[in-house]
Image (spheres, rainbow, N blue to C red):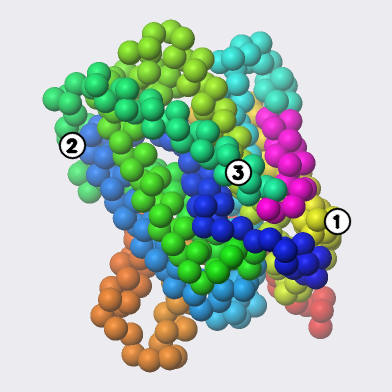
Amino acid sequence: MGAISQSFRMKKIGIVSSSALIIGNMIGSGIFLLPASLALYGGISLIGWVCSATGALLLALIFSALSKRYPDVVGGPYAYCKKVLGNYVGFIVGWGYWVSIWCTNAAIAVAFVGYLTVIIPGIAAHNSYMALAGASVLWLCSGLNFLPLYTISVVQKWITILKVIPIVVLCFVGFWFVDWSSISFGNLSTTTTFGAITATTTLTLFAFLGLEAATIASKYVSNSKKTVGQAGIFSILITALLYLFSSAIIFGLLPFSTLQNSTAPFADATGVFLGDAARTVVAVIALLVTFGALNGWMLIQGLIPHAMVNDELFPKVFGKENKYGTPYLGIFISSCLATGVLLLRYTDSLIELFSFMMNLSTLSVLTPYLFSIVSLYVVLAKQAPLNLGMQLLLGASFSFCIWMVFGVGWEVFMYGIGLILFGVILYELKIKRSK
């Protein structure tokens, strides 16, 4: 930790860079792919967006409260849970969070390749070309994250600005072409109304993953007690407005029957008022979005195992730092695993791989979220009786997470449980070897 601490003694990141890191992690390929998945359910999916945004805001308040009590930690949910609930829970949280990150990175890389084929169609000719392109962008972001955190945050800030502006402009122009009378909150699926809301809330929650990003590196954030919480809440509000508004615009531009079969909903919707050239324009924006999201998650995938190394819960190799204090070997190993996932599944369709990884990542992250809520409850309960407001926050956020666990479906749930059990076995073996 000495090298990292020293590298940030001179200059820490502020609320703008912290917000950019969170928004950059949340606004990824999902915003361009989700409208097609949601079209199956119809306009009721807009209610799903509202529910997931509300749940994300509740979780942001949870992490804001934890960051005020533990401002100088590295690892976010992992660090909080370890301090409050002990090493065993800390390891399970850290393991689940780490697995979800490199799985997400593999999915984002695949989505990046999908958008790249619009600009360079020849890549789609062979699966091997697509695999090589996906691995290349993974390692490009890995190399970028070998630089100092402050440099990474500056890059992320500008990437976030560049990718948010086109989305805002696109929505503003599209607004004037929308047939608002065609938008309803009806349920087009065969499931019940509650089932449709549950499914769409689970799908859209993936788009908010990363809301806790600022807590991971809160030790390196200026005035972290105040900045981390403000950045989280501000970022979710901005992102939720972009998501909800863009989805409503697309629903108003394209019939649901057309949207259900679209592999590039933003491109198809933009084509309504910009013509064929819109597909290339939106593809460029999507590439920028996915690159920014991948860049942000690369940073997190190195910091989580690094924090666990310092607590002697992870192999020491993950703690190796370069001259900038960056845990480069942790990033390197994590990227190797992400590349492995990409190569093993590259024969699947882009949508199949992305959808599976999306739900698996969501489920994996729900474990840290649930234990973080429990951690906050334990901390506050030891100090004084909980006031009504905090009781409502804890109860509502916990209930929301449990609701989302059921929403991912049994297949993904079983995969997720298997990954967690594998981590538990590794931990038990480590404990036995240390005795």
Quadrant of the drawing holding the C terminus: bottom right
Q: Is residue 387 left or right of residue 66?
A: left
Residue at label 1? 323
Looking at the image, residue 118 lies above or below residue 367: above
Q: Residue 46 lies in what quarter of the image?
A: top left
Quadrant of the drawing holding the N terminus: bottom right
Query: Going 55% across and 76% down the picture, which residue do you hit?
Result: 70
Residue at label 3? 156
Q: Which residues are magenta?
A: 134-150
Q: Identity of the amino acid at label 2?
A: Phe
Q: How many callouts does the rendering have?
A: 3
Query: Going 43% across and 8% down the picture, which residue do you hit?
Result: 276
Query: Going 17% across and 32% down the picture, which residue do you hit?
Result: 184
Looking at the image, residue 182 lies above or below residue 78: above
Q: Are marks 2 and 3 in contact (CB under 8 Å)?
A: no
**Of the image marks 2 and 1, the number of the one nearer the N terminus:** 2
Q: Identity of the amino acid at label 1?
A: Lys
Residue 327 falls within the magenta-colored stretch: no
Q: Position of residue 112 (x, y in %)?
A: 59, 29
Q: Is residue 308 left or right of residue 236?
A: right
